[in-house]
Amino acid sequence: MTDELTVDFEPLGRRARVGHGATLLEAARQAGVGLNAVCGGAGTCGTCRVRILAGQVTPPTEAERDAVADGCRLACQARALGDVRADVPPTSITAPQRAQIEGRERAVELDPAVRSFDVVAAPPSLTDLQADVTRLREALQEQHGVAVERWDHPTLGRLSVLLREHGWRARLVVRDGEVIDLAPAGTSHLGLAVDIGTTKVAAYLMDLGSGETLAAAGAMNPQIAYGEDVMARIAYAMEGEDRALDLQHHLVGGLDDLTRALCGQAGRASSAVAEAVLVGNTCMHHLALGLPVRQLGLAPYVPALADSYDVKARDLGLRLAPGANVHLLPNIAGFVGADHVAMILATGMHEAGEVTLGLDIGTNTEISLAVDGRLLSCSCASGPAFEGAHIRDGMRAAPGAVEWVRLVGGRVEYQTIDEAPPVGICGSGVLDGVAALRQAGVLRSNGAMRLEDHPRVRRTEGGVEFVLVPAGERSAPRDLVITRRDVNEIQLAKAAIRAGVEVLLEEAGLEAGQVERVVVAGAFGTYLDVGSALAVGMFPPLPRERFVQVGNAAGMGAKMALVSRRCRGVATEIARRVEYIELTTHPQFVQAYMAALVLP
Amino acid sequence: MTDELTVDFEPLGRRARVGHGATLLEAARQAGVGLNAVCGGAGTCGTCRVRILAGQVTPPTEAERDAVADGCRLACQARALGDVRADVPPTSITAPQRAQIEGRERAVELDPAVRSFDVVAAPPSLTDLQADVTRLREALQEQHGVAVERWDHPTLGRLSVLLREHGWRARLVVRDGEVIDLAPAGTSHLGLAVDIGTTKVAAYLMDLGSGETLAAAGAMNPQIAYGEDVMARIAYAMEGEDRALDLQHHLVGGLDDLTRALCGQAGRASSAVAEAVLVGNTCMHHLALGLPVRQLGLAPYVPALADSYDVKARDLGLRLAPGANVHLLPNIAGFVGADHVAMILATGMHEAGEVTLGLDIGTNTEISLAVDGRLLSCSCASGPAFEGAHIRDGMRAAPGAVEWVRLVGGRVEYQTIDEAPPVGICGSGVLDGVAALRQAGVLRSNGAMRLEDHPRVRRTEGGVEFVLVPAGERSAPRDLVITRRDVNEIQLAKAAIRAGVEVLLEEAGLEAGQVERVVVAGAFGTYLDVGSALAVGMFPPLPRERFVQVGNAAGMGAKMALVSRRCRGVATEIARRVEYIELTTHPQFVQAYMAALVLP
C-alpha cells in the first residue's frame, strides 16, 4: 500500500496520507482525529459517522444503512478511492469530554517511597582517593543516616560530571536503598498519580516533599481509537502481537503528553518526576505494562499479574526521571482491577464500622460490600449505555449533551453540558429520562411505551419513541429521542448492577435494608442523579441520605498510594482480603438479573 | 562532508566510503580494518603505517618523516584527495593476535547468583481464578521452597503466552528473589565471564547448572581503533560526550559478537545467557558501563565507582537473556581495577600463608604484596614497550613476531610465533634480546652498546643498533634490529615495575629475599621468560623456583565470581582490605625508580 491519497477531516483541518482503499477510520487514526469507535471498527456500533464532502469512497455496506439514511457514512466501512474531504460531526468525536478528576480526599501521613536528601561531599585529593560513589554514599550516611546499596544505572552515569559541576553538592533521590536520581542541591522531586480509565485518564502531579497537589488534569485514553470498551481493546490486541504493543505505545505516549502538560503547569520538567502510581482496571493495567490481554478475553478471565508491581518507568517507555519507578496497585481479578482497590482505599470502606456498599459505575461496574471485616467484590458487565453508547441519540458527556432531564406536569425540562445547543443525550440524561418517563407513567414496568400517555410519544418504522428535544428547540439540529430500545438498554445495564448488589448481599447473608452507606464513585457515578437511579431500580430502595457520591475515588486512592508506603501496604491487604464472587457462574445471578430487569 | 571517495585496503579487500579530506585512519575504522593506533591518531606513535598503492593523498607531514623513509605513510596523517588504494602491512594490523585465555583454575563450590527451576502449575479454571504470576510463584514455593518477590519486566511480558504454549510447565530463572527469565522446562541457563583488557578481551561461556566451561575465546578490544592505551582512550572520550558513548557502543558490540560466537560453539543462543561477570581495569570498567572517564585522566585519578555493581544487561545495550544481570567486581583505585581484584581472587594470594608478590604486567602493571594478612597494591605506568610499541621493530604478539631470543656463543638464536617469516619483535622477544645482550656483555649497565663487542652491532644515522635478524634470513623482509633507544624503553618499563615492587616491600618492612612466591599473570606475563626478566632486573633477584606464571588469572577470577556468590563476597573483601599505595606521590618512588633503571 503506497501513500498516495489524502483524506482531510473538517472542521478540524487534519490531513492523513493513506493508501488506496484505506478506511476513513484508519485515516482518522493516522491524522490524530479521535473518532468514536465503540466496536473497534467492526461496523456494528455506528458511532464513527462522518459526512463525505468531496471525493470518491467505496459504496455503502449493509452495516451503514442507518448512517446513510442520515446522510452519513461509517468511517470504519468507507474506503478512500481518491482524495477525500470528510466532515466530522461533534457527536462522532471522542474529545473534548468532561473528565472527572476531583474526588473526596482522605488525609494520609506523608511517607513516600521516594525521599531526597541534600549532601555535601569533600572533593577528592591525593590524600583522599575514594571513588565518587563511595564519597556520596558516606556523605548520605553521615549527614542523613540513610544507607544506600544500589545506584540506578543512568543516574550513576551522570553523577561524576554533575558533582564536579556543582561543587560536590547534590540532591540524592533515594528509593528502597537505591539512588534513583541526582540533581542540584535544593531541587524538589515530584510524583505522578494516574487513574487510567478505559475512556478517560485522570492524572495528578504532587510534590513528594510536601504532599501538595501541584496540578491535575484529565485527558482521553488515546487507545479509544482502537475500540471503546475493554472487550474491543482485547479483540484488537489479539489480532497480533504488535497490536498490543501499539496500544501500550499509544497509552504511554498519552501519559507522556499529560505529564508534560502537568509539569508545565507547575513550571517543572517531566524529568523531575521520580515516582508514579498507576491504577486502572485489569485490562488497562495489563495494556499499560505491555502484558498480553488474550487471557482476559477468554474464560476463565484470569489476569497475568495480580500482585502490586514496581517497574522502572524507562522499561515502560515512560519519560520521567531516568531512574523513576512506576508502582501499580494490585488487581483483584480479571474484571476487578487496581482502580477498584484504589477506590476502596480512598473511601476507607474496608475499615469502616458500617455496612458499606461501594460501586464504581462504568462500562464495567465493580461492586464491593464491606461487612463485619469481610470484603466481597464482584464485577458486572453493565455495558456502555451509561457512556451514551448503544443509545439512539446517545453521546458521551461532552458539550451539547443533555445531561439532566425531568418531566414537570407533562412538560420536559432539561439541561445540556455547557448550555450548548442539544446534540445528543449522555448517560445521566438517558437515566433521568427513563426514570422520569416511568414516574410519569409513560413507561410500563417492562419498558413498554404507550402512545396515549404523552403527546411526545410517537411511533416510527423502528418502533415507539419519546421526543425529548424537538428539532430546532434551543437550536437542536434534529429531534433527540429516547426509543423503546434505549429504555431496554438502560434496563439491561441497571439490572446487571442491581443483580451484582443482590448477589453480594445474599453472600453476606444481609437484607438490603441493613446497608448503612452506599458509596458511588466514578465519572458517571458523580453526575448520575441518585433519585433517578433509585427510580429505575439500579440500587436497592434505601433512604437517599445513605448515598454518597465521591467523585474519582480511584484517582484519590492512587494519590494516597503515591505519598504513602503505608497505603500501598493497605492496598495489598485489601486485595488479599477481598472475597471475589464470580457472577457468571453464581447460582443466584441469573434469577437476580431477571428480577432486576423490571422498572419499579 | 559528503561520502564521495572510496578507500580500499589491501590485501584485506575492505572498502570505505569517505568524504574528501578524511584521514585513512578514519577510513580504516569505517571499513572495520583494525589498524594500530597506539597514540589514538595523534601522529606520534608511528604504528598506523600503510603503503599508498594508487590514488592521491595529502603531502606527508613532519610526523611522517620516518614512515616516508620506509616508503610508507601514517594513516592518521594522510588524507584522501581522491579514490585511494592502500596496502596494510601485517605489522600495522591489530588482529589476529595471540590472546591469553587459559589460566590456572581454582576449584570453587558451585553457588551461582542465578538458579533455575522447573515448575508445573495447575491451569486456571472457573473455580481457580488465580493470576498467572501467583500460580507460578506458589508452584515455585511448593515445588522448590524458593520464594520470589519480583518479576523482571520483559520476562513478565512473555510469561502468560509461554505458559499456555507449554502446558503450564516452565523453567524459571531466579536471581536474588527476582524471576529474570522463563523458558521451556528443562532448558539449561548459561553464564558469561569476560576479562576486558585494554587490548584484548577474553570470554568464557559456562553452564550455570553444572559449572562446566562450554567455550572460551579471545578477541581484540574493538576500542583499539580509538587509541591503544588507557590514556589515549580517555583522551578520545574527553573530546565529547558522544565519544565516550561511541567507545561503550563499540565494546558492547564486540561483546555481543563474542557472546554470539561462544554460544554458537555450544549450540545455544545469546538469549540463554542469564548472568555475566565483567572484569577490567578501572578505565575499561567505566567505559563498559558508559561512565565518564574524564576524572580517571586527571589527578587525583579517582574512579566514579569502586564498589561491585549489578546492572541489567539491557541497560548496557548487551543482548543476553531479557532479564540478565551483569555483575562487575569492585575496583581498588583509578589504576588498579576489578581485573586485579579478580587476579588476587584467582591466585588466592590474599589468603596464602606465604609472603606473595602478584604482578599483572601490561601497559599498566598492577602489583600486590600479601604479607601477614595485609594486602598492599600499587600501579605503575610500565608503558607499551612490552606490547611491542615504541620499539623500532616492535610489534604485538602476532604471527611472524620474534618471541624468544638467546645468544649462544655470539650466535643469535630466535623463534617466531607460528614459525612464520620474521616481520617484527614482540615484547618477550625484545626483553630476551636485551637480557641476552646484557649477559653477553654487548650492553653496559646503563644500556649503552659497543660496536667492538659484537659483529652485529652497527652505527646508523639514528644511533647504534644490534641486528637481530638480517634481511632475507628465513625470508625476513628487512633487517630487524634492537636499537639503543629500544634498550632504553625496556629499561624504563622494567624500572617502573621494579620500583613498584621495592616501594611495596618498603611499606611492608620486608627485604626482597623474604618474598616466598611471585605470581606473574597476564598475557605478557605468560610468555615472558622469567630468566630474562631477572637478568634485566625487572624482578628482585630471587630463586627461579619461587616464580609461577599463571596465565589469565583475571579471567579465571571472573569465572569464579560467575559461578560463586561466595567468591563475589571475597572479591569485595579483597578490595576493601587492600591498602592502596599511590606511587606518584610516594617519597621513595623516584629514588627506587632511578636505581632500577640500571641493568644488573
Image (tube, coloured by chain):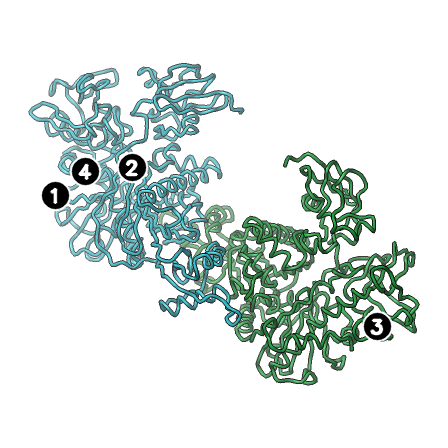
Chain colours: A cyan, B green
Of the residues shown, which amino acid type is indicated by label 2? Answer: Thr
Of the residues shown, which amino acid type is indicated by label 1? Answer: Leu
Residue at numbered disc 4: A538
Counting residues from the start of the chain, the first of labels 2 and 4 encountered is 2
Judge from the rendering whether residue B249 lies leftward or rightward of residue A348; answer left or right.
Answer: right
Image mark for residue B443: 3
Nearer to us in this view, A346 or B122:
A346
Of the residues shown, which amino acid type is indicated by label 4? Answer: Met
Residue at numbered disc 1: A542
Residue at numbered disc 2: A363
Which residue is farthest left? A409
Is residue B15 positioned above or below B496 on the image?
above
Tell me if residue B391 can be seen. yes
Residue A55 at x, y = what percent? 43, 14
| Badge 4: residue crowd in 10 Å (few <14, some 14–19, many ≥20) | many
Is residue A287 positioned above or below B480 on the image?
above
Please tell me whether mark 2 or mark 3 is closer to you in this view. 3
Q: Quadrant of residue A139?
A: bottom left
* Subunit under mark 3: B
Counting residues from the start of the chain, the first of labels 2 and 1 encountered is 2
